[in-house]
Image: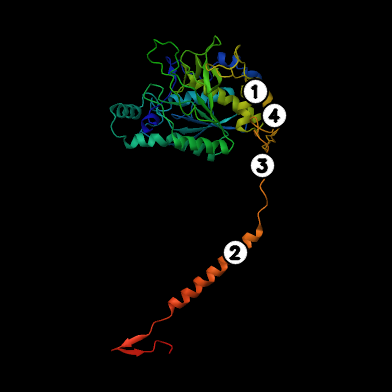
Amino acid sequence: MIRGLATLVIGLVVATATPAVAEAPRGWEQTVMRVPAAQRLGQGKGVTVAVLDSGVMRDHPEFRGRVTTGPDFIGGGARPGQSYWGEHGTAMASSVLRVAPQAKVLDVRVLWDKEDPARKRAERAAESGGPAGEQSRKAATALAKGIRYATDKGAQVISMSLGSDEWGLGSDYDERTAAAVDYALGKGVVLLASAGNGGSTDPLEVDANNVVSYPAAYPGVIAVAAMGPDGGRASFSQVHTYNQIAAPGVDIYAADNGGGHRMGDGTSPACALAAGTVALMLSRNPDLTPRQVRDILVKTARKPPSGYTVFLGFGLVDAAAAVRAAGSAKDSEIAAAPYKGEKYFGDGPVAAPTTNPPMDMSYVAVGGVGAGVGLLFLLVAAVLMRRPKARHVHGTRMPGPGF
């Protein structure tokens, strides 16, 4: 378990840096998700999205005070300003805020960037099979702590662009993280996670694993697959039955931790874009439950021709349709539903029901009297046995006490 969670992968392939600019142009993802139309209905105002990642450079020109920095649950020694601090998380916060420009981002560090020396040390320790160090043990609890922290701080959405062991070192279910997910859901928080980047369906692809990836596989978490510009599954997007929706994940232009912007691929930005859509939905209707959010995303998604698939789930997120549906959704009511089916689940009894004659209460009375008499004799015997015996001194009988 520690080995798997200590090597959470970042899932974002970063290209050559582009010149630093304060504002990056909108990419193709904005168009296919119908984000401009969705933003005319809501912009995420009043909604906090917790980005559980490798850190967010909150002073990036694109963010303009919309990022609050929370605790660093994973540690490792990296600090803001270093190239291996906040590379992945900054891009994810950028994708969230591109969709929901008036939302707030809560930065919670639970992940190492790919080039972080702490991550490399943890990977070497896991590969050697030796005992886990203090840093690896800390990493094993980082995600669970981050989920609980974000929930207690009032985040309505938790975006987790990460996955356990996409690089083939195993896949781990962690009871502490599962309990944290349940805790957040119980507080009404919507959780999303990237499906994973080891999803090639080519049998000759040695880097593909399609292992079960957590937290995407935890019940209640909305797993987001990645779609390419051609409308099909991105070649790296993992294929699983828990995939629920899809969002663009190829050539996504986002902020980097150096103050500029970069192009990236992965199910990570797909998750962040979907999280931004949820922020728009909640700004339109803050009373939506996690189940309602999921149902709306599924019902309004642009479905593949064959319906649900393990490649893209129920289809591409349609931000405009989702926000519109959120505005018209009614309050969720939870009540027991009466059963209206057949009287019997099977064929029913094979014979008429039998009846027994009524019990003769006289026997009960006689038995009770007998039991009472027996109890009386036992009490008398106990009293007699407790009476003191006569004492003798040098053969002479002496009266006992009380005589």
Labels 3 and 1: the sequence-earlier one: 1
Nearer to me, 392 or 20: 392
Q: Is residue 146 left or right of residue 344?
A: left
Labels 3 and 2: the sequence-earlier one: 3
Determine the CA span between mark 2 and mark 1. 72 Å
For the question of whether residue 301 can be seen, the reply is: yes
- Residue type at numbered disc 3: Thr
Q: Quadrant of the N terminus?
A: top left
Mark 1 neighbour class, 10 Å CA radius: few under 14, some 14 to 19, many 20 or more: many
**Image location of residue 49, percent across then percent down:** 55, 31
- SS for dot 1: helix
For the question of whether residue 70 can be seen, the reply is: no
**Image location of residue 76, percent across then percent down:** 36, 33
Labels 2 and 1: the sequence-earlier one: 1
Mark 2 neighbour class, 10 Å CA radius: few under 14, some 14 to 19, many 20 or more: few
Of the numbered discs in the image, which one, if any, rests on residue 117? none
Mark 4 neighbour class, 10 Å CA radius: few under 14, some 14 to 19, many 20 or more: some
Query: Circle 1 is placed at which residue position?
Result: 322
Query: Circle 3 is placed at which residue position?
Result: 354
Determine the CA span between mark 3 and mark 2. 29 Å
Labels 4 and 2: the sequence-earlier one: 4
Residue at x 54%, y 19% (from the top left corner): 23
Determine the CA span between mark 4 and mark 1. 10 Å
Determine the CA span between mark 4 and mark 2. 65 Å
- Residue type at numbered disc 4: Ala
Query: Circle 2 is placed at which residue position?
Result: 368
Labels 3 and 4: the sequence-earlier one: 4
Q: Is residue 138 above or below residue 36?
A: below
Circle nearer the viewer, 3 or 4: 3
Query: Circle 4 is placed at which residue position?
Result: 329
- Residue type at numbered disc 2: Gly
